[in-house]
């Protein structure tokens, strides 16, 4: 979970409060807190650890479920069933208010961060609204927000029968909330219990499969194996050593290959030396043979013949190397210039977002993230429908015909 820090999630948040906890003696507070801890541990035992974050609030707890939205419903129903007094109905427990809890559920955005101890923590509108929703509940009640109701009530017809509309409430920050109360419909409760049993059975089956895969065939005893992280580390080390050896071999081969192949400068200089070697030298006159009557001088002077005309370039010398085309060189330099855009490309348009307090941005029906933290987005020129959604307010939508290099700022405040 720590590797997902500083990320934003849309998740279900359950806020639990022990009624009258601060007014009770310390011994009674310890008993109530121990009972809540045991019942909460039993309620979430079938939910994967990576799908939940639990925060201790002192007089209760806050749980964020990053997976299925039904997890929040199963957990709260299990807690309410576990904390009912023996021989009393759910309505009687709510009326008594003794040793009861009240719970609120909300579906909204939260940001996963690290606290001062380096442990995962959650902040954001999702947990804040969950606490406000919980404050509207009576002892023993489970109250949900409109955003959570819209999602879960459409998952099964039995779930829809659980919820009763209670109207609109205003919190201390003068913010309106439409709330629903989870009732005691037998069919819905049976559906929820069956779903919890199916999930528990699938979880146990997966755990058994993983355990059997690590045991040798025919072994019926528990064996100690190397932890998965240690195996992964060893495997990664072997792979890294193998890749290093391959890279070293390839580097050696490339080095020797470059040594055998002449460089471009040598290749270009070789033809230039050919004309000098093949150019004919001027003819020299041979000395006259000595006569029989005349004595041979000790040093006969060498008589040079008249200088011959230099040979024609097209007959004796090879054609000169072609010079690079100046126009083509200029075009190549222009193509590689990073300061100038490539020919044929169209500069994109830019969208800037100033959404308060937050909103999920959709471009032509496709989500590009939640703003904030998303501040800007680039799009090619064209016509787009921009829609900003907030779970508790009407959506804001507008259509833009974007041109190249357009800079458009979308400002909206949900209130």
Image (cartoon, rainbow, N blue to C red):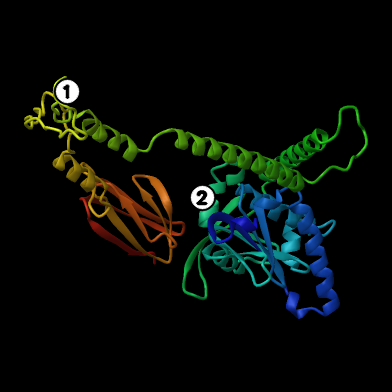
Q: Position of residue 285 (x, y in %)?
A: 13, 27
Position above or below: 194 against 119: above
Task: Give the residue displayed 85% in from the left and 57% down from the top.
Answer: 86
Q: Is residue 92 left or right of residue 293?
A: right
As drawn, the residue found furthest toward the top would be 292
- Say which quarter of the image contains residue 260: top left
| Secondary structure found at label 1 | loop
The quadrant in which the C terminus is found is: bottom left
Q: Nearer the viewer, residue 223 or 327?
A: 327
Q: Which mark is residue 328?
A: none
Q: Nearer the viewer, residue 51 or 349?
A: 349
Say if mark 2 contacts mark 1, CB within 8 Å. Answer: no
Q: Nearer the viewer, residue 381 or 287?
A: 287
Q: Position of residue 149 (x, y in %)?
A: 54, 52
Q: Position of residue 30 (x, y in %)?
A: 83, 72
Q: Callout 1: 10 Å neighbours few (<14), some, many (20+)?
A: few
Task: Give the residue displayed 86% in from the left and 31% down from the top.
Answer: 216
Residue under label 2, please give it: 150
Residue under label 1, please give it: 290
Q: Callout 2: 10 Å neighbours few (<14), some, many (20+)?
A: few
Position above or below: 215 against 184: above
Task: Give the residue displayed 11% in from the left and 32% down from the top.
Answer: 304
What's the distance in space between the residues labelled 2 and 1, CA to CA?
A: 126 Å
| Secondary structure found at label 2 | helix
Q: Is residue 88 left or right of residue 403?
A: right
Q: Position of residue 243 (x, y in %)?
A: 61, 40
Report if residue 86 is visible in the image.
Answer: yes
Q: Nearer the viewer, mark 2 or mark 1?
A: 1
As drawn, the residue found furthest toward the right would be 221
Q: Nearer the viewer, residue 268 or 208?
A: 268
Report if residue 18 is visible in the image.
Answer: no
């Amino acid at each position: 979970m720590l590797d997902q820090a500083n990320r934003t999630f849309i998740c279900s948040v359950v806020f639990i409060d022990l009624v009258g906890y601060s007014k009770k003696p310390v011994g009674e507070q310890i008993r109530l807190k121990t009972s809540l801890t045991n019942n909460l541990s039993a309620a979430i035992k079938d939910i994967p650890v990576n799908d939940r974050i639990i925060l201790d609030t002192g007089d209760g707890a806050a749980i964020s479920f990053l997976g299925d939205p039904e997890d929040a419903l199963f957990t709260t129903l299990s807690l309410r069933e576990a904390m009912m007094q023996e021989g009393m109905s759910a309505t009687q427990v709510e009326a008594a208010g003794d040793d009861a809890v009240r719970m609120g559920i909300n579906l909204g955005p939260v940001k996963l961060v690290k606290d001062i101890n380096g442990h995962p923590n959650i902040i954001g509108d999702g947990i804040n609204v969950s606490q406000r929703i919980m404050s509207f509940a009576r002892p023993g009640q489970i109250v949900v927000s409109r955003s959570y109701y819209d999602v879960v009530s459409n998952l099964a017809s039995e779930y829809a029968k659980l919820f009763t509309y209670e109207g609109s409430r205003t919190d201390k920050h003068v913010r309106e909330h439409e709330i629903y109360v989870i009732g005691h419909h037998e069919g819905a409760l049976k559906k929820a219990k069956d779903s919890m049993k199916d999930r528990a059975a699938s979880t146990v089956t997966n755990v058994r499969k993983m355990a059997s895969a690590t045991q040798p065939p025919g072994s019926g005893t528990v064996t100690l194996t190397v932890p998965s992280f240690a195996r992964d580390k060893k495997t990664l080390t072997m792979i890294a050593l193998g890749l290093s050896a391959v890279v070293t071999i390839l580097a050696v081969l490339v080095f020797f290959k470059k040594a055998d192949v002449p460089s471009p400068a040598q290749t270009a200089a070789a033809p230039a030396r050919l004309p000098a070697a093949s150019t004919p030298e001027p003819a020299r006159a041979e000395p006259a043979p000595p006569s029989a009557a005349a004595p041979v001088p000790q040093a006969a002077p060498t008589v040079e013949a008249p200088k011959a005309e230099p040979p024609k370039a097209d007959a004796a010398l090879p054609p000169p190397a072609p010079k690079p085309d100046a126009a083509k060189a200029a075009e190549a330099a222009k193509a590689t210039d990073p300061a100038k855009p490539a020919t044929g490309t169209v500069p994109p348009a830019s969208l800037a977002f100033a959404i308060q307090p937050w909103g999920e941005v959709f471009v032509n029906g496709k989500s590009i993230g939640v703003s904030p933290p998303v501040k800007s987005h680039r799009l090619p020129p064209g016509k787009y429908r921009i829609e900003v959604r907030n779970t508790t307010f009407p959506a804001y939508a507008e259509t833009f015909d974007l041109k190249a290099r357009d800079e458009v700022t979308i400002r909206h405040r949900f209130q």
